[in-house]
């Protein structure tokens, strides 16, 4: 096995989030599905942005947030994802590197602008996302660095990357490379609508390659078109090594090694913005896995990291998660 | 007199703020003057940004923040300032318009990129600013819309605009146009180092044209190279119609109409980031002036708006200031 340089290498859509507060009427008026991630074209993005109140730009991208969380926990993280060589692309690259994540994907020099995700946060702290993928769809097999994959304990794949066909092939290549190098493959299903678009592909990938699956309740129910969470839970138990299923304030259920753990959510003083909750849960969990922790501890680490990120605006930690878990005695 | 379409038209450097937390060691290492605004060239901006931790991008610009504050108070505000037709420029334009401010300055189609201000917020909530002016220096006399000036109760000039020579001429033109239209001219001295660079020009402008001057303690002391705040206060009493002098947590002193008011700062539960304190004080004060309020009430309005903006990250209000002043009984 190659020398281990990274605990986790994450591959996903490199996106800058554009966050603003909005009420439910705004979502209705613009036909935005509450709580979901919807893909929009450039025209759609322009139309929604035109109606949005003043916003804040913060680097995001689902598994990019996870990579930043792992670095904040003291883990060694790398990231692959495509931006253009434009202002938002440079902001993305600066922020992820400044957070301590290794990031060397070559930016596109032509084609669409760097991706952005217009996020409306409603007073109930839910986030509704409208993603213009832009340059992120240019991510392709040539961007997958085989040496980095082979030297990472876990490669973490973002389900959203199944939307652009070239990126889907790149993810599949990364999974094959990781397996060949004796490494673990983790996957997030990303979003229930994303599962709808790629149900059988995801089922096949999970059966063939995935060691650790992340999904929330809606996603895993959609994956098997189950009648209930428990039905889906029974399906997933036999399908992959470990599954971490998140249920918002109801905590999470971890299945694997013949075990089932029901983990409480970590208490939050003030719920501000749920953006990044799943991403940071995955950060804590994967950090635990790469540190050789048991599944219950991995789940507890996920809960602490998720609770931190939902207590403020934005999808990346505001404090050192390493210090936070030390305070919590983890 | 032309019909009044706006309460206040503000003219300044159109800037996107790039905010991050840093400690004092970072300031020392990068030779950054604590609490000041320092102009940096593109190379300097690149160097500091390279060392900065992950950041948040929020539209800023001193008097642009003031214009947004006036709109949030329910006033009618317009803004003039130059961006390029790039991503950060579009972010700036979107945010100020979405905040309800009229903004029609034509963006530059060539030349340097839109201006940015790299702001380091230290644990004591002080902000140290490093501004790359970029496209903002292209603001010139052709960008001054005479009709808007003539139809605004007050034109509010940003001292920082004295740094680019073309922009300085544009400010002087705006002051002349306002006077000719029987309108009021307000000026902010912006920064003690800016006063150092343009002391006699500012003194001349104040004597000849300024009806309402905004300055903090350091700026007004620098303006007259006074030995004390009180010395400066005595100088300024005779020099212009009204002066609003801010003193951080010590509140403000308002002089004008032969009166002197000493106004308390509004209490703040948690001081997070002083960026925008002066800008929002000016918003409250100018809103009061255009509503025909007495000077003490104008000062109180400034205190409430300033207290709101320093209780969170970023230099523009997070809540409706109109609602806030209603709650405060103003």
Image (tube, coloured by chain):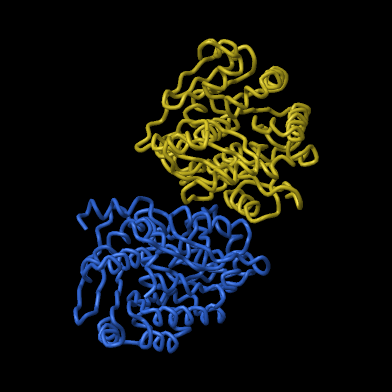
Chain colours: A blue, B yellow
Quarter of the rendering occupied by the N terminus of chain A: bottom left
Front in this rendered view, residue A277 or B303: A277
x, y percentage for residue B112? 71, 47
The mark tally for this picture is 0
Left or right, residue A250 beside residue A314: left
Task: State the residue at coordinates (66%, 37%).
Answer: B12
x, y percentage for residue A198? 46, 84
Left or right, residue B269 beside residue A23: left
Left or right, residue A98 beside residue A220: right
x, y percentage for residue A62? 44, 67
Farthest right residue?
B142
Res A143 → quadrant: bottom right
Res A263 → quadrant: bottom left
x, y percentage for residue B1? 76, 32
Against B84, is A247 above or below?
below
Front in this rendered view, residue B297 or B81: B81
Quarter of the rendering occupied by the C terminus of chain A: bottom left
Task: State the residue at coordinates (72%, 46%).
Answer: B105
Against A59, is A256 above or below?
below
Left or right, residue B100 beside residue A280: right
Against A258, is B298 above or below?
above
């Amino acid at each position: 096995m190659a020398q281990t340089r990274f605990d986790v290498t994450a591959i996903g859509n490199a996106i800058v989030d554009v966050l603003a507060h909005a009420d439910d009427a705004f979502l209705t008026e613009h036909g935005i599905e509450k709580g979901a991630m919807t893909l929009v074209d450039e025209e759609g993005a322009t139309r929604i942005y035109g109606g949005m109140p003043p916003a804040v730009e913060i680097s995001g991208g689902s598994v990019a947030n996870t990579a930043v969380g792992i670095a904040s926990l003291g883990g060694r993280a790398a990231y692959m994802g495509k931006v253009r060589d434009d202002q938002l692309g440079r902001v993305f690259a600066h922020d992820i590197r400044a957070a301590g994540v290794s990031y060397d994907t070559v930016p596109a020099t032509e084609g669409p602008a760097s991706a952005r995700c217009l996020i409306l946060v409603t007073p109930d702290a839910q986030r509704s996302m409208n993603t213009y993928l832009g340059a992120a769809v240019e991510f392709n097999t040539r961007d997958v660095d085989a040496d980095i994959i082979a030297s990472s304990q876990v490669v973490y794949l973002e389900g959203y990357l199944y939307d652009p066909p070239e990126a889907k092939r790149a993810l599949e290549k990364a999974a094959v490379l990781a397996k060949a190098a004796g490494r673990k493959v983790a996957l997030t299903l990303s979003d229930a609508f994303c599962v709808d678009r790629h149900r059988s592909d995801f089922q096949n990938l999970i059966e063939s390659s995935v060691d650790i699956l992340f999904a929330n309740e809606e996603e895993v129910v959609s994956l098997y078109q189950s009648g209930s969470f428990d039905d889906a839970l029974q399906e997933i138990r036999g399908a992959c090594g470990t599954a971490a299923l998140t249920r918002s304030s109801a905590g999470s259920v971890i299945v694997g090694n013949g075990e089932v753990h029901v983990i409480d959510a970590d208490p939050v003083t003030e719920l501000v913005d749920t953006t990044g909750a799943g991403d940071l849960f995955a950060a804590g969990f994967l950090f635990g896995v790469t540190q050789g922790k048991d599944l219950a501890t991995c789940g507890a680490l996920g809960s602490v990291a998720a609770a931190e990120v939902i207590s403020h605006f934005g999808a990346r930690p505001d404090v050192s998660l390493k210090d936070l878990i030390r305070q919590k005695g983890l």
